[in-house]
Image (spheres, coloured by chain):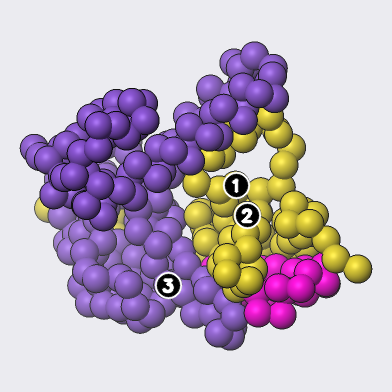
Chain colours: A purple, B yellow
């Protein structure tokens, strides 16, 4: 995988070291590449913030700080794309995260008796209000429940949830039954969440 | 009378929290800045208020609890509340303020549509 920044031919680590050297001697490939210059600017801002923190003689990092940061990281990793919602006027922009929509899909599917939702994906370009998407859901169905019926119920529930709570147009909801479980919850399905 | 961005941010936090259906607020700051600033200001406002080119940009990140209401309607009400809070702070840039509301979580309490609960054992 190419880890170089822009067309500079230098990695993030290279840029960081270059910045530490005071950007001397000047490397033209970096200084003339817009993406590399943007990364240098970000690194400089972060460095300034770090220095500010040191100068303010902050308290030692508390254990709770790390937990809070990791919660933030987890939430941001799950957030995915920002998908537009209808806004009351032009002064305002309202979006919902892809992660929130995936959670909606999961809750809608899990509400169907005998069904546990595994993986969910939302395919389609979602930059515009009212974009059409297709949804892919894998489910586990309790032993004894007709599979086609369970899949149809999940499809209806997901379509309903998305039509009520988002501005997306649902073109298709593909439901794949990839597991059968007994009344006890299948660990394999739980593991996919 | 005017207010500093952090005062405006706190006012937005307070007003958005009163909107029916807004269950929680999250920090709207970028992750890295959030982690660093948490070291020195644990109780800072969650709303992010920035002035760019003379235009005030306000970003709010919320969780909504839907109980028959649409998440979009709650978010729109939150956006309206945020804008009112900014306008009420009398900042020079407030008139053209841009408000961005990000719904980061939807908690569903509303019943889903009736679904077929067939109990046949035929697969």
For the residue labelled by badge 3, is the local secondary structure a helix, a strand or a loop?
strand
Distance from disc 1 to disc 3, alpha carbons, whole Å, reads 19 Å
- Is residue A161 located in the magenta-colored stretch of the structure? no
Residue most extreme to the bottom: A89
Measured as percent of width and height from the top left, residue B68 is found at: 59, 70
The residue carrying mark 1 is B27
- Nearest the viewer among B82 and B54 is B54
- Label 3: chain letter: A
Residue most extreme to the right: B1
Label pair 2/3, CB-CB below 8 angstroms: no
Q: Which range of residues does the magenta coloring cover?
A: B70-97
Residue B38 as seen in the image, left or right of residue B19: left
The image quadrant of residue A181 is top left
Asked if labels 1 and 3 share a chain, the reply is: no
Distance from disc 2 to disc 1, alpha carbons, whole Å, reads 8 Å
Task: Using the image, tell me which numbered label, if any, was put on residue B48.
Answer: 2
- The quarter of the image holding the N terminus of chain B is bottom right
Q: Which of the two discs, 2 and 1, labels the residue nearer the N terminus? A: 1
Residue A30 as seen in the image, left or right of residue A157: left
Disc 1 vs disc 3: which is toward the camera?
Answer: 1
Residue B71 as seen in the image, left or right of residue A185: right
Residue most extreme to the front: A25
- Is residue B93 located in the magenta-colored stretch of the structure? yes
The residue carrying mark 3 is A84
Distance from disc 2 to disc 3, alpha carbons, whole Å, reads 19 Å
Identify the residue at image location x=40%, y=45%. Answer: A41
């Amino acid at each position: 995988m190419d880890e170089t920044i822009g067309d500079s031919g230098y990695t993030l680590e290279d840029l960081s070291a270059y910045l530490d050297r005071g950007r001397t001697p000047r490397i033209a490939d970096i200084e003339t590449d817009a993406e590399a210059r943007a990364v240098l600017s970000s690194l400089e801002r972060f460095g300034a913030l770090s220095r500010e923190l040191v100068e303010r003689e902050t308290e030692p990092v508390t254990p709770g700080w790390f937990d809070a940061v990791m919660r933030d990281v987890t939430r941001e990793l799950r957030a995915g794309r920002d998908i537009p919602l209808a806004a009351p006027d032009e002064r305002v922009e309202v979006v919902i995260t892809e992660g929130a929509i995936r959670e909606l899909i999961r809750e809608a599917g899990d509400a169907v008796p005998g069904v546990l939702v595994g993986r969910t994906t939302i395919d389609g370009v979602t930059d515009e209000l009212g974009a059409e998407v297709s949804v892919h859901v894998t489910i586990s169905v309790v032993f004894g429940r007709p599979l086609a019926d369970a899949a149809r119920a999940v499809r209806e529930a997901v379509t309903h949830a998305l039509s009520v709570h988002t501005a997306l147009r649902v073109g298709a909801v593909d439901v794949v039954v990839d597991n059968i479980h007994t009344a006890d919850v299948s660990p394999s399905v739980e593991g996919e969440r | 009378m005017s207010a500093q961005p952090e005062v405006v941010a706190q006012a937005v936090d307070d007003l958005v929290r009163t909107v029916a259906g807004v269950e929680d607020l999250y920090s709207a700051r970028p992750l890295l800045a959030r982690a660093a600033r948490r070291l020195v200001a644990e109780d800072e406002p969650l709303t992010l208020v920035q002035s760019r080119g003379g235009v005030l940009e306000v970003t709010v990140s919320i969780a909504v609890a839907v109980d028959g209401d649409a998440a979009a309607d709650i978010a729109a009400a939150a956006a309206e509340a945020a804008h009112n809070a900014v306008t009420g702070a009398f900042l020079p840039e407030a008139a053209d303020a841009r408000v961005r509301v990000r719904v980061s979580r939807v908690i569903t309490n509303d019943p889903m549509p009736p679904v077929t609960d067939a109990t046949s054992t035929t697969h």
